[in-house]
Amino acid sequence: MNDEQLLDELKEAENQIADRIADNMETFGVSSTVGRLLGIIYMNRNAMTLDELAEQTGMSKTRMSQVMRQMMALNIAEKEFVKGSRKEHYNVENDYVQTFISLFTTNWQEVISQNMTLERRLRERITKLEASIEGEASADIQERIASFKQELDDWSAYYKWIRRLVDFFESGEILNAVPVKEPRAENQHSEGGETNG
């Protein structure tokens, strides 16, 4: 193969990675467009302008701007200063693990916030409901209120657990519990190599 053919083959392989990144984003509840831009910028290995992204994707510059804002909100992209250029350049996190952690924690923080707010509102509603009961409530009503309060306690415990899990990821402690690279002895064993022991 000549150099041009080799470059074409490499470009095709890079496109496959970018496409797979796009597909994987749906697992996080993120649009494939976000994933496509993440893959394009990642494989470019340099910051890119909205014009360059629009040209690569065939989408409008306005759409690229919207998607880049979404990516920055997910903490997987940022503006980068490029000396000598007046255009805004964007770069992405180049560490797969950190990208995963950012997507996981950003999405779950939003879920936690929404659900803890709902819990607070529901507790206030039950408190008002209890205060509005005239006299003694029936056994059925008392049982249902107690059951609902227990449900809210379980709900709260669940989202507090998720918050601790998010903190575990954000602090980097997850990498101590589940290292990115397998310990050497395990790695050799899984590849059929001999271990000393």
Image (spheres, helix red, strand yellow):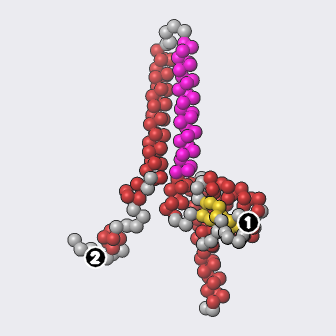
Residue furthest to the front: 84
Residue 34 x %, y %? 64, 59
- SS at circle 1: loop
Q: Give the range drawn in magenta.
A: 105-133
- In terms of secondary structure, what is the magenta stretch mainly? helix
> Where is the N terminus found, in terms of image quarters?
bottom right
Residue 37 x %, y %? 65, 64
- SS at circle 2: loop
Q: Which of 153 and 136 is in front in this view?
A: 153
Residue furthest to the top: 135
Left or right of 169 in this view: 14 = right
Residue bearing mark 1? 87
Residue 183 x %, y %? 34, 67
Task: Identify which residue is drawn at 48% across, 35% down.
Answer: 155
Left or right of 38 in this view: 142 = left
How many residues crowd around disc 2 within 10 Å: few (fewer than 14), some, or many (20 or more)? few
Residue bearing mark 2? 194
Q: Considering only vertical position in the picture, is 6 above or below 37?
A: below
**Marks 1 and 2: in contact by CB < 8 Å?**
no
Residue 94 located within the stretch drawn in magenta: no
Q: Can residue 87 be seen in this view?
A: yes
Of marks 2 and 1, the one in the foreground: 1
- Which amino acid type is shown beneath numbered disc 1? Lys
Q: Which of 155 and 164 is in front in this view?
A: 164
Task: Identify which residue is drawn at 56% across, 19% down.
Answer: 128
Q: Considering only vertical position in the picture, is 31 above or below 142?
A: below
How many residues crowd around disc 1 within 10 Å: few (fewer than 14), some, or many (20 or more)? few
